[in-house]
Image (cartoon, helix red, strand yellow):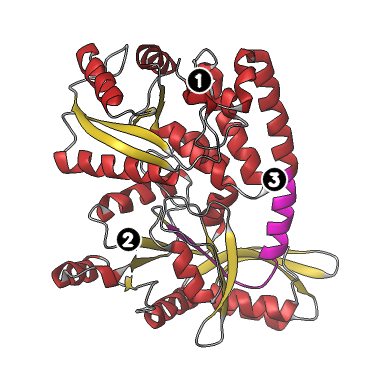
Amino acid sequence: MNNFFQYDEDSIHPDKALLVTIKYPDIRDKEAASHLEELGRLADTMEVETVASLIVPLKAPKQKYLTGEGKAQEIRILAENKEADIIIFDDDLTPAQQRNWERMTKLCVIDRREVILEIFAKRASTREAVLQVALARMVYSLPRLTRAWTHLSRQKGGAKGTRGEGETQLEVDRRLVLQKITRLKKELKKVKSHRDTMRKKRREIPLPTGALVGYTNAGKSSLLNILTRAETYVEDKLFATLDPTTRKVILPGGKEVLLTDTVGFIRKLPHNLIDAFKSTLEEAVLANFLLHVVDTSDPEFRQQIKTTRSVLNELEASGKPVIFVFNKIDLVSDTFLVEGLKEEYHGAVFISSRTGEGTEELYRAVEKVFNESGITEIFTIPHDRYDLVALLHRKGQIIEQKWVESSIEIRAHVSLQTSSRLHKILEGGMI
C-alpha cells in the first residue's frame, strides 16, 4: 500500500482521479460523453482533480471488474502513468468488484454512488441531513466491510479523504455497524417528529406553497434569491445546497406565497438518498404547485427534464400544477431553440436568474396558478358564520360536511385564492 492514506487535510494538493464511464450498446456516443462530463463535475464538487478520463465500450457487464480483465489492466496502467490516487466509475460497482479493483491497483476505487454520498456528507448542514447522510453511508458500507478502504475508515477523514484518523476502525464488525444504523434511525425518528411539528405550524399559515424542483445546478437557489430578495447560498457546483429553504414571495397584486428550494435531482440518484432526503423532497409532495427549473444552456436539458419527472413520479408528486421555468436564457444564443420550446411548453417562462430577465413574467405565471389551482382542506366553521359555509358551497366543491359541538367541519376542494381568504377570516382555524 502507498502512503496515500496519510493525506493531510491541510495539504494544498488535491486528490487526483481517473474517471471511467461505461458505454453499453444502447447508449449514444454523445450521451456517454455527457455522462463523463457530469462525473467530472461531481469529482470537482468533491474537490478532486481529474487527471484523465475515458469511455469504455462494453457489450455486457463482467463479473470480476465490470470491464474485461484486459481493459482493467489498461485502466490500471493509465492510472499509474497519470499518478492517479483514485479511480472513479460512473456506473455502480458491486462490493466484490470494488475489492477486486483495489487489490489489483492498490488504489482507492469508488463509484458514482459513493461520490454522491461523499458530497452529501460534506454539504449537509441541518441535524436531520447530517443524520440521514450518516445512515445512508452506513447502509452503503455494510456489504463493503471487507474492502481495503471501507467507508468506516473515513468517518473522520473528510469527504475526499480516503485515509486518516479513522483507519483503526477497519476491524469494525457487522454487529457494530448494525447497532449504529439502529441508533441513527432512532435519532432520525425524533428529529422527524420535530420537523413535522414545525411543518404543521407553517402549513397553518394561510398561504399557498410552491416548491422549486429541477436538476442539480439548474439555478433554483439563484431564482429563489431573485423572487424573494433573499441571500440563499449559491455556488456553481452540483448539490451546492441540500437542506430545504423556505421564503415568502409577495406577488405584484399583493398576494403572498411560500416558495421552498429543494435538493437538486440527478441521473442515477441513489435510492437510499431519495429516502434520506425526504426532509426536502417531501416539500415537493406537499406543495400546492411546482416550479420546474431547467438549465436551458445545458445540451442535455431534455434528459434532465426526464430525470426530474422520473423522481417526481417516484415521490408521487407529479399530479400538481407545474410551471416550467427555463433558466439561464442569457447563455442561449439559439433563438430557434427558444421559439421551439415556447411552442412545446405552453405557459413556460424564460428567465435569467443572473440578470433578472423574465422575472415579471414568472410572477404573473405564479399568480395565475395561485388563482386557478385548487387544494383540498378541512375547514372548521363556527355556527355563527354560515356565510362562510355558503361561500364554500359557492366557490368550492364540498366533499364531506359534519356538525360538531360548536362548529361545522367541512372538507372541500377550493381554489388557493379562496383558501387564503378563508384562513385569514378564520385566523388559522384549519385543522
Screen quadrant of the C terminus: bottom right
In terms of image quadrants, where is residue 208? bottom right
Q: Which residue is mark 1?
A: 149
Q: Nearer the viewer, residue 215 or 386?
A: 215
- Which residue is painted at 75% across and 50% down in the image? 194
Q: Amino acid at mark 1?
A: Trp
Residues at circles 1 and 3 in contact by the CB criterion of under 8 Å: no
Residue 198 lies in the magenta-colored region: yes
Magenta span of residues: 191-213
- Which residue is painted at 24% across and 44% down in the image? 34
Q: Looking at the image, is mark 3 or mark 2 earlier in the sequence? A: 3
Q: Which residue is mark 2?
A: 295
> Which element carries disc 1, helix, strand or loop?
loop
Q: Is residue 29 above or below residue 411?
A: above
Q: Is residue 335 above or below residue 217?
A: below
> Which element carries disc 3, helix, strand or loop?
helix
> Which element carries disc 2, helix, strand or loop?
strand
- Position of residue 160 measured from the top left corner of the image (x, y, whole percent): 49, 36
| Horizontal arrangement in the rendering, residue 26 relative to residue 417 (left or right) | left
**Which one is closest to the eye, mark 3 or mark 2?**
2
Q: Is residue 258 above or below residue 112?
A: below
Q: Nearer the viewer, residue 282 or 215?
A: 215
In terms of image quadrants, where is residue 188? top right
- Position of residue 372 measured from the top left corner of the image (x, y, whole percent): 46, 75
Q: Nearer the viewer, residue 425 or 76?
A: 76
Mark number for residue 192?
A: 3
| Horizontal arrangement in the rendering, residue 297 relative to residue 335 (left or right) | right
